[in-house]
Image (cartoon, rainbow, N blue to C red):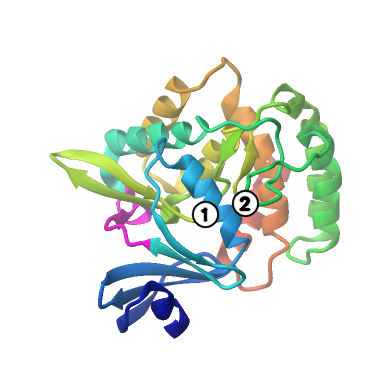
Amino acid sequence: MKEIAAALGAEIVGSRVLAGGFSHQTSLLTLTSGPVVVRVGGADHEIEAAVMAAARGHVPVPEVLKVIPGSAMVLEYVAGTPLSEVLDGGFELGAEVGRVAAAVGAVTFDRPGFFADASLAVAPQSPWSQQLPEFAEACMAKTARLDVSVRKAWAELCALHAPALAAIDEQAHLVHADLNPKNILVSRVDGRWRVDALLDWEFSFAGCPYGDAANMLRFAADYPEDFVDGFRTAFAEHLPAEQDWLYLGQVLDMFALSDLVTRPAGNPVADRAAHEIRRWVTR
């Protein structure tokens, strides 16, 4: 942390660890020049910084103050309340989050896929509809979180639904890919809800925005119904085409669910993903 303070030309007068993802540590540093947020670990910080710069102007994103290659990323501190703490904010809050979630997809690229470098060049890949069966089968082969019958049923289910993704294989919009209540800061301004920042862009890629909606709604059974109704209504209003986005988003989310259950024991999100997979295969 002293290296980071030196890079910013300031001294640390206080620090505390913030809640964050399982792939990195996030800390709030109070410097003589003011508060900053520091992310240590995780994916390529230079790529993430470039993604955030591309998203700025379309959605609220913290300013990247410094990238220390291979080490850390220093971000502007944004005041706000994690959405996870105020999900009872009603239809209006859900609609504001849905509007911002849809706006992420306003950023477009030449083709779908994952970013190869900080120029945001997209690496060539096979279509999602072809990738899903093989990806799901590979994930099921390396997890002990599910019993054998469930793993087999899930791989078969992914193969069954994968062809539907042909309808969105060519879409190349920016996808946040980790859009959930802990990565969204909100506030109440003049009697209305406002999204102040979308955080943690490390998993972003070019693809279909329906995946972000599915990520957000993955555990919707735990959210107030009016919030969920608001989110769905506003997200749908900003879609560029008429498609069964709820279904296609759920099929896209099969990638995430398959990957999540391979995480080490004790990961609560992975345990919840396992519960979702069991629910899928038994319904």
As drawn, 11 above or below 261: below
Point out the tag, 1 or 2, that comes first from the N-terminus.
1
Marks 1 and 2 in Cβ contact (< 8 Å): yes
Dot 1 surroundings within 10 Å: few (below 14), some, or many (20 or more)?
A: many
Q: Which residue is mark 1?
A: 49
Distance of label 1 from label 2 (alpha carbons): 8 Å
* 231 relative position to 247: left or right: left
Q: Which residue is mark 2?
A: 118
Dot 2 surroundings within 10 Å: few (below 14), some, or many (20 or more)?
A: some
Looking at the image, which residue is at 43% across and 84% down? 2
Image coordinates of residue 1 in percent, x first then y, are 44, 82
Image coordinates of residue 262 in percent, x first then y, are 73, 62
- Quadrant containing the C terminus is top right
As drawn, 212 above or below 138: above
Identify which residue, 166 or 133, lies in the foreground.
Answer: 166
The magenta stretch spans which residues?
76-87
Q: Amino acid at mark 2?
A: Ala
Identify which residue, 234 or 154, lies in the foreground.
Answer: 234
